[in-house]
């Protein structure tokens, strides 16, 4: 997991799926899957 304080976002990896989820720091909701 990586937190970006400038954008108030957390990046969480899903190794088996090969994806990264972007989580909004205010709402704690997934804003995007990459």
Image (cartoon, rainbow, N blue to C red):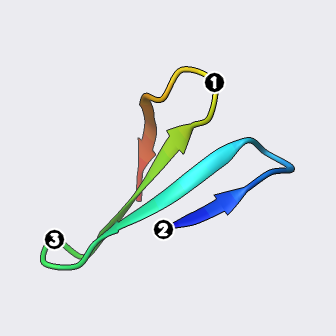
Local crowd at mark 3 within 10 Å, few (<14), some, or many (≥20)? few
Q: For the point 50% across and 42% down, which residue is it?
A: 23
In x, y percent, where is residue 2? 58, 67
Q: What secondary structure is found at the residue carrying circle 1?
A: loop
Front label number (2 vs 3) = 2
Q: Are marks 2 and 3 in contact (CB under 8 Å)?
A: no
The residue beneath circle 1 is 26
Q: Quadrant of the C terminus?
A: bottom left
In the depicted structure, whether residue 19 falls above or below residue 6: below
- 8 horizontally vs 23: left or right: right
Q: What secondary structure is found at the residue carrying circle 2?
A: loop
Q: For the point 73% across and 41% down, which residue is it?
A: 8
- 6 horizontally vs 26: left or right: right
* Comes first in the chain, label 1 or label 3: 3
The residue beneath circle 2 is 1
In x, y percent, where is residue 17? 16, 71
* Comes first in the chain, label 2 or label 3: 2
Local crowd at mark 1 within 10 Å, few (<14), some, or many (≥20)? few
Q: Are marks 1 and 2 in contact (CB under 8 Å)?
A: no
In the depicted structure, whether residue 28 falls above or below residue 17: above
Q: For the point 13% across and 78% down, which residue is it?
A: 16
- 12 horizontally vs 3: left or right: left
In the drawing, what numbered circle is on residue 17?
Answer: 3
């Amino acid at each position: 997991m990586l937190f970006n304080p400038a954008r108030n976002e957390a990046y969480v990896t899903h190794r088996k799926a090969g994806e990264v989820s972007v989580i909004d720091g205010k709402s704690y909701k997934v804003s995007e899957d990459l």
